[in-house]
């Protein structure tokens, strides 16, 4: 028997499907707006800042990831300036995010993760055994097409700019009870290939974040 379709049921089904899919398109994931209130007092976070290299299996929620990225290098003023300083306001550091589901470029303006690899490349973000076990690995990539003007050693300034972002991540993790370790030990050629970097882009450091192993 042919059953007559119920338009209300169809509407509810379409709404349910729409709400359950976080992806904007096949190649991007919209993060929730960052929560920029709360956390530990600064002096307490400084007391708790440390490197931890042992990670639990637990994933970070999309909300925690959004908060982490905002703390790292989000926009904190109406003129578009960020939570970390950068030489000449170059804002040359992009953050790539490697998770079990894939690797993404964080579009900080839209708070969207743009897929660059639909596979797990976490282990490639370092050379040590713990790297592949961290829920999230951030990769700090300098885009030298934004690095302009003469004078000071550009690599020094790019390194300094990356350090500020890394310390923001350290303090966020200290505040949230997360484990983190920044590192220089990376097979940069292999990782640059997987991240599909252009010649003017250079990997500076990477940083693992996850829940500490109990
Ligand atoms: C620029 C830089 C590079 C680092 N590279 C690595 C690394 O490749 N592997 C690693 O396990 N830790 C790395 N670390 C973490 C340091 O070993 C760690 O910060 C140091 O032992 C001090 O410990 P603390 O952060 O708990 O004070 C690096 C830290 C910095 C600042």
Image (tube, rainbow, N blue to C red):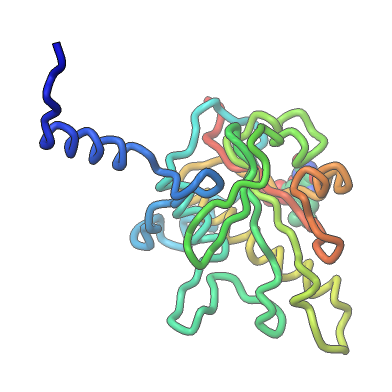
Kindly give the residue lying farthest to the front in the view shown. 1
Please name whichever residue, 207 or 20, is drawn nearer the observer in this view of the structure: 20
Identify which residue is drawn at 62% across, 34% down: 134
Query: Is 9 left, or right, of 66 in this rendering?
Result: left
Please name whichever residue, 78 or 30, is drawn nearer the observer in this view of the structure: 30
Query: Is 91 left, or right, of 143 in this rendering?
Result: left
Instruction: Determine whether 21 is above or below 163 in the image.
Output: above
Kindly give the residue lying farthest to the top in the view shown. 1
Query: Is 34 left, or right, of 158 in this rendering?
Result: left
Screen quadrant of the N terminus: top left
Identify which residue is drawn at 58% across, 33% down: 101
Picture quadrant of residue 171: bottom right
The x and y percentages for residue 93 are 69, 66
Identify which residue is drawn at 86% across, 62% down: 199
Identify which residue is drawn at 53% across, 54% down: 47
The x and y percentages for residue 32 are 38, 52
The x and y percentages for residue 62 are 43, 44
Question: Number of marks in the image?
Answer: 0
The x and y percentages for residue 90 are 69, 79
Instruction: Determine whether 48 is above or below 156 in the image.
Output: above
């Amino acid at each position: 028997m042919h059953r007559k379709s119920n338009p209300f049921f169809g509407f509810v089904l379409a709404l349910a499907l729409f709400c359950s899919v976080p992806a904007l398109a096949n190649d991007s994931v919209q993060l929730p707006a960052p929560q920029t209130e709360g956390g530990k007092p600064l002096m307490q976070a400084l007391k708790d800042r440390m490197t931890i290299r042992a990670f639990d299996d637990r994933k970070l929620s999309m909300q925690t990831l959004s908060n982490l990225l905002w703390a790292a290098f989000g926009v904190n003023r109406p003129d578009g300036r960020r939570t970390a300083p950068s030489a000449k306001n170059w804002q040359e550091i992009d953050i790539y995010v490697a998770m079990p589901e894939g690797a993404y470029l964080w579009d900080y303006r839209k708070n969207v993760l743009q897929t660059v690899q639909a596979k797990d490349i976490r282990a490639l973000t370092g050379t040590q055994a713990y790297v592949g076990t961290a829920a999230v690995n951030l990769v700090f990539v300098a885009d030298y097409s934004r690095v302009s003007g003469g004078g000071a050693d550009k690599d020094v300034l790019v390194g300094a700019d990356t350090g500020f972002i890394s310390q923001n991540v350290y303090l966020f993790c200290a505040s949230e009870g997360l484990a983190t370790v920044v590192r220089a030990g990376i097979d940069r050629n292999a990782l640059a290939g997987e991240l599909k970097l252009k010649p003017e882009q250079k990997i500076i450091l990477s940083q693992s974040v996850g829940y500490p192993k109990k």
